[in-house]
Amino acid sequence: MQQSMSEKRSAVSRIIRQIQARGERVTIQRRLVIEALCDSNDHKTVGQIQQYIQHEHGEHDFSEATIYRILQWLKALDLVAQTDMGAVGIVYALVPDRPHHHLVCLTCGATIKLEDDYFCALRERVRKDFGFAARIDHMAVYGQCRACSEQTSSLPSSS
Ligand SMILES: [Zn+2]
Ligand SMILES: [Zn+2]
């Protein structure tokens, strides 16, 4: 699905309004990182965010360390989730109204998107038993995909 310029712009301003409502300042650098995350609603590594900014806004060039600091700030504001996707690396994504998660195959790197329903019961139970509000906003669950486990189980046993 192609995302239009205006969709991206309105997503960026929606987030900026949320940030300003909390009394935080939005610098040009912070704005560009937010824009990179709104671009095609994708999950990006720090390197991919840097590439996006260089590509779209060549006049602004800032280091991975700066981008990382801004991402940590967005994370503290509950606007961005940080997830270790295994081989892909650590990705950052905007926290959507409806969370989703990923199954990540450690053998082939395949990822499968997981609806939030799977975690609703867990969240409820943890809250009931511990009074703990678990922040399960973007989980990566590691393991082996069907194709890889079928391949492993069909291998001749070495013993
Ligand atoms: Zn995701
Ligand atoms: Zn696999």
Image (cartoon, helix red, strand yellow):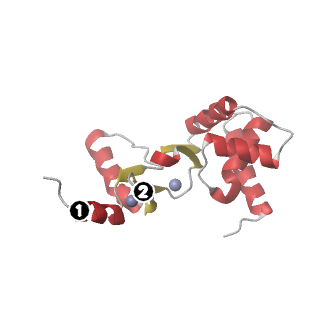
Residue at the extreme bottom: 1
Q: Quadrant of ligand 2?
A: bottom left
**Mark 2 falls on what kind of element?**
loop
| Front one among 148 and 48 | 148
Q: How many marks?
A: 2
Answer few, some or many: residues within 10 Å of disc 1's Cα (few below 14, many 20 plus, some between 14 and 19).
few
Q: Is residue 8 left or right of residue 135?
A: right
Amino acid on which the number 2 mark rests in the picture:
Cys
Mark closest to the chain's N terminus, 2 or 1: 2
Figure quadrant of the N terminus:
bottom right
x, y (%) of residue 81?
53, 44
* Location of residue 6 (image quadrant): bottom right
Dot 2 corresponds to which residue? Answer: 108
Residue plotted at (62% across, 37% down): 71
Q: Residue at x 70, y 45 (%)?
A: 34
Residue beneath label 1, please?
Answer: 153
Residue shown at the point (83%, 45%) measured from the top left: 57
Q: Residues within 10 Å of mark 2 (few under 14, many from 20)?
A: few
